[in-house]
Structures are given as C-alpha cells and as structure tokens.
Amino acid sequence: MRVTRIFAAVALGLASSISLAADPDQLIRQSLTAIQPDLPIEAIAESPMPGVYQVQLKGGRQLYASADGQFVMQGYLFQFKDGQALNLTEIEEGRAVAKQIDAIAAKDMVVFAPQAPKAHITVFTDTDCGYCQKLHSEVPELNRLGVEVRYVAFPRQGLGSKGAKELASVWCAKDRQAAMNKAKSRQAVDEATCDNPVAAQYQLGQMIGVNGTPAIILENGKMIPGYQPAPQLARLALEAK
C-alpha cells in the first residue's frame, strides 16, 4: 500500500483546498482519496485522543488524521493509564483482524481440536514451509495443552505455485486432516480438485499483513509471525482469550 505517498502529499498541503464546511468524516475521506483513490477506508471515528480521528483500513490497519483532513499520520497511539501504557493502535487493529478471522467458516478450515478446547489459534500455512512442518509436528502437544489449531491456506509463492496446487488438494481431500498430515511430513498428497477457499484465504492473509508462513493469529487478533514452540504458543493462546 502506498501509504508513504499519502503522507507526503498531505504534508504538502494538497488537502487544504477542501471545504471546511464538511464534517470530519467527509474531509478526511476527501483528503485521502484525492491522493489514493483506491485506499480501502472502512470506517472513520473519533480516537480516544481529543481532536484526532482514527481511520480504519480494510484489513485492520489504522491511520490517524486531524478533523480537517490536512494532517495524517501512521504509527502507534498509546494511552498512559494507571501507570500502564496501552497500545491503542494494536488493540484496534487486533479487533479488526479477529473479526475477519472469526468470519471464516469452520468448513473452510482444516481443524485439529482437543476434546475440550481451552483456546484456539488460526494458522496461515503452506505445505512445503519448513517451520510450518515443525509447527505441525507439535499440534498433538498443542491439543494436549488445550489449544485447537485451525489451518487456513497461504501459498506463499502465489496462487499459481506448486504449493497452491497442493493446498487445494488438501482442502479437496475426503479426509483433510490425513491429507494435511501427509503434506506436512513431505509425503505426496493425492491430487484433487473442488470449489475450495485457497484463493480467498490467500487474499485475506495479504490484506491483514501476512507475508510469510506460519502466521499465527491469536483469538484477540494479534499476529505472531513465525514458529513458536508449543508450550510458549499455548501460553500466548490462553492469555489472548
């Protein structure tokens, strides 16, 4: 996303020609879309900081703007309260990501669940990723610790890659768990085709900022980029509830 171009242009005062009679939502939208027409703005609302508005982009990312739309910034907004520093940006971005992840239907995932789950993680995965395979080898331990593992597809070399084709075969298998186990142990998976969610999940991953695998999403929407040992990951998953 060409966010830096937005800031540079706004800083030059290109938004100053917008009528100040409009409301903040309209002014901010006009400023941003004048510079980048395809900027995916989802919502604009007052932030906890007086005089500053938060702009939520599709995928969960946040920008901040003045009420007149002439100043825009990207970064973390902290609130210091009771001796603690709360990262309000991370909290809002996490909520937005969690909402999108929660909207994925269970039938569109490959799920490894314990009998009595205490927490769950959603993992954007590829089949030939070494650390994805290492993480998968620890799924039984995660299950033993009460963590349900929900896989979604992210062929990191693109939708035309061998990995994308193999992921589609996993999702189209009669027994997805068995197919995933084979793929993650570097065994050949029987080729299969069907109407599958691989492309949609890949696009969702790109939208929320996934750029490698495994990318682990906790229940609160926080993303953990990369492998974590099962005990540490289980602790994070339980803390995120």
Image: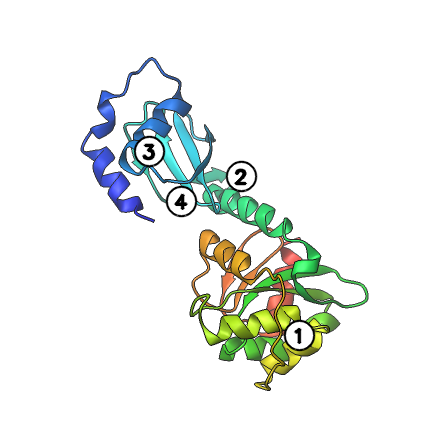
- Distance, label 3 to label 4, CA atoms, is 22 Å
Residue on which disc 3 sits: 33
Q: Nearer the viewer, mark 4 or mark 2?
A: 4
Q: Position of residue 44 (x, y in %)?
A: 45, 30
In-image side of 96 versus 37 (left or right): right
Q: Along the line of sight, which residue is nearer the eye, 22 or 190?
A: 190
Query: According to the image, label 2 marks what residue?
Result: 82
Q: Amino acid at mark 1?
A: Val
Callout 4: SS:
loop
Q: Earlier in the sequence, mark 2 or mark 1?
A: 2
| Precedes in sequence: disc 3 or disc 4 | 3
Horizontal and vertical percent position of residue 149: 66, 66
Q: Looking at the image, tell me whether mark 3 or mark 1 is earlier in sequence order.
A: 3
| Residue 16 visible in the shown view | yes
Mark 3 residue type:
Thr
Q: Which residue is mark 1?
A: 139
Mark 2: amino acid = Asp
Q: Quadrant of residue 190?
A: bottom right
Dot in front, 3 or 4: 3
Element marked by disc 3: helix
Q: Nearer the viewer, mark 3 or mark 2?
A: 3
